[in-house]
């Protein structure tokens, strides 16, 4: 038999269930499609990382990855026809666009008498699998987390590049393109690819897992795994990580499993409600008053550029640009600031994050934003308004995080860095005064949220 293996968000050869489905030793063509619809919203940092992962995958396959450009509903059936594939193998995609695309490809293949065979997904437990006792879906995380653990996941699939007999793409009559050259980036980005993912994971297990339960909240310390970018493109599967933690009941391992459960939960929620990628999950909040107009756009620009005058917010927004990544605690602080101090729609901020984050993932991002905005499932209570100064003092107690990303404040010692306006002589030259008064904006936000609750 001949198989076409179409890679999407699973750019690896280890623990690759599509290889098992294709049948050991089968002749197979490895394919990646450069799809403008998916690439267009990605910033340079994410493309840089993606193209690096593709180059890594191509190397693992002995230079036998076929890359083509175009609409998958056209090019996948074309390639399948040219190579004489029996079936096309993929890991299932559950995003709103991915689902539609796959349905289109499936129909086009069916007209040729071929099938799209879905094996596995980017998740430990695929959306739709974790169900309530009466077969319903979960809208609240804590019971989902329990049911998710009870459901369990498969052990990693034992595969490598030699599992299949790869066809030389040069022998297939289709218009191939090289893996695109990575765009120029100024950001300091992680090494792409499967080996880099494994290496990073081993470092985390050795140095950070023990302290993860508390260390994960400290942006001034290297306490988290930084696996999100590798999970985004499937350089490693979450099942592989969970298997490595299987024997551990330590606090760190428990906390890490819970974070992976959040990833699966948000994918499940997006699968239940694809519209929640663009609109409030809780539609009552469509009535929430938000600001627009020139002043709102001026504040939005200050937020994007990390020039709000609130040091921890500015450090986060600059880390995002500098590294294509931001610490989770600071994602919450900067998001809360946009929504509750600047009164801007959460999707303005979500779009900016999606463009710059290398790990930018529709489910985790849109629902992370809605959690902060209080408009999502399982959201933070509406009255929780992060105080950017107290958050900074608590989670960056010595101010090291701020000084790393905000050079204007590099000479301010200790926690005083969180209140530059209170320094003798005011904020250092070049650093802005606060763009808003937090106490006042907090009261405005509470009034606006209260107004929505009253009409409910
Ligand atoms: P670790 O603390 O080491 O966590 C391990 C893994 O668990 C992560 O790699 C990630 O896959 C998963 N995880 C951790 N926290 C969450 C969470 N809250 N929701 C879902 N999964 C989680 N994560 C993304 O992967 N892509 C996004 O686009 C994204 N946008 C976000 C936007 C906002 C406003 C917020 C508040 C959170 C967002 N997150 C997103 C979740 C979280 O911030 C990142 O997953 C985390 O910071 C990645 O760093 P890490 O791998 O070192 O995390």
Image: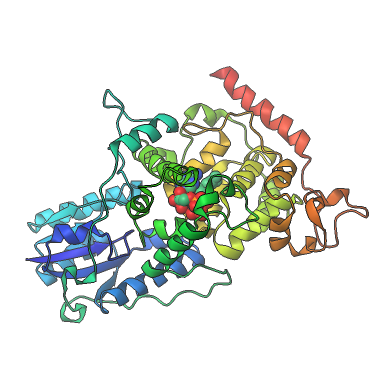
What percent of the width, then of the height, locates residue 181? Answer: 42, 77
- In the figure, is residue 400 to the left or right of 31? right
Chosen colour scheme: rainbow
What percent of the width, then of the height, locates residue 267? Answer: 38, 43
Snapshot quadrant of residue 236: bottom left
For the point 20% across and 72% down, the residue is 162
Q: Nearer the viewer, residue 196 or 213?
A: 213
Snapshot quadrant of residue 199: bottom left
Quarter of the image for the N terminus: give it.
Answer: bottom left
Res. 292 in view: no
For the point 63% across and 23% down, the residue is 450
* Position above or below: 367 against 138: below
Q: Nearer the viewer, residue 317 or 100?
A: 317
Q: Furthest-bottom residue in view?
A: 170
Q: Furthest-right residue in view?
A: 425
What percent of the width, then of the height, locates residue 447? Answer: 68, 26
For the point 45% across and 75% down, the residue is 182
Q: Nearer the viewer, residue 68 or 394?
A: 394
Res. 175 in view: yes
* Position above or below: 182 against 395: below
* Position above or below: 386 against 49: above
Count the numbered circles shown: 0
- In the figure, is residue 374 to the left or right of 243? right
* Position above or below: 193 against 91: below
For the point 56% across and 42% down, the residue is 346
């Amino acid at each position: 038999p001949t198989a076409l293996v179409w890679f999407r968000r699973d750019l690896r050869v280890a623990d690759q269930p599509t290889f098992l489905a294709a049948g050991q030793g089968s002749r197979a063509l490895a394919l990646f499609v450069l799809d403008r619809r998916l690439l267009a919203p990605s910033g340079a940092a994410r493309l840089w990382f993606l193209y690096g992962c593709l180059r890594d995958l191509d190397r693992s396959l002995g230079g036998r990855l076929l890359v083509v450009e175009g609409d998958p509903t056209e090019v996948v059936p074309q390639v399948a026809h040219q190579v004489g594939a029996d079936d096309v193998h993929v890991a299932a995609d559950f995003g709103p666009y991915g689902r539609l695309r796959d349905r289109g490809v499936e129909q086009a293949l069916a007209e040729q008498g071929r099938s799209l065979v879905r094996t596995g997904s980017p998740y430990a437990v695929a959306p739709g699998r974790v169900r309530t006792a009466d077969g319903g879906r979960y809208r609240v995380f804590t019971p989902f987390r329990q049911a998710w653990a009870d459901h369990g996941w498969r052990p990693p699939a034992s595969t490598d590049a030699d599992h299949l007999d790869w066809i030389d793409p040069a022998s297939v009559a289709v218009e191939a393109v090289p893996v695109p050259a990575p765009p120029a980036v100024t950001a300091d980005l992680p090494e792409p690819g499967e080996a880099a993912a494994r290496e990073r994971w081993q470092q985390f297990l050795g140095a950070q897992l023990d302290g993860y339960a508390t260390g994960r909240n400290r942006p001034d310390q290297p306490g988290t795994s930084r696996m999100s970018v590798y999970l985004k493109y499937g350089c490693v599967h979450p099942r592989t990580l969970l298997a490595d933690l299987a024997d551990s009941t330590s606090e760190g391992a428990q906390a890490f499993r819970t974070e992976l459960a959040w990833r699966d939960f948000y994918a499940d929620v997006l699968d239940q409600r694809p519209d929640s990628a663009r609109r409030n999950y809780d539609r009552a909040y469509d009535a929430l008053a938000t600001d627009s107009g020139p002043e709102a756009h001026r504040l939005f620009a200050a937020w994007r550029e990390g020039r709000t005058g609130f040091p921890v917010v500015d450090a986060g927004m600059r880390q995002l640009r500098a590294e294509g990544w931001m610490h989770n605690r600071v994602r919450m602080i900067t998001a809360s600031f946009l929504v509750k101090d600047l009164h801007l729609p959460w999707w303005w901020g979500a779009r900016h994050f999606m463009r710059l984050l290398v790990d930018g993932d529709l489910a985790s991002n849109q629902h992370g934003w809605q959690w902060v905005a209080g408009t999502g499932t399982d959201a933070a209570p509406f009255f929780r308004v992060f105080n950017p100064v107290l958050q900074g003092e608590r989670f960056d107690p010595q101010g090291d995080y701020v000084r790393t990303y905000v050079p204007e404040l590099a000479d301010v010692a200790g926690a005083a860095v969180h209140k530059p306006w209170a320094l003798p002589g005011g904020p250092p030259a070049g650093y802005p005064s606060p763009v808003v008064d937090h106490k006042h904006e907090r009261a405005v936000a509470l009034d606006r949220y209260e107004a929505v609750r009253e009409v409910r």
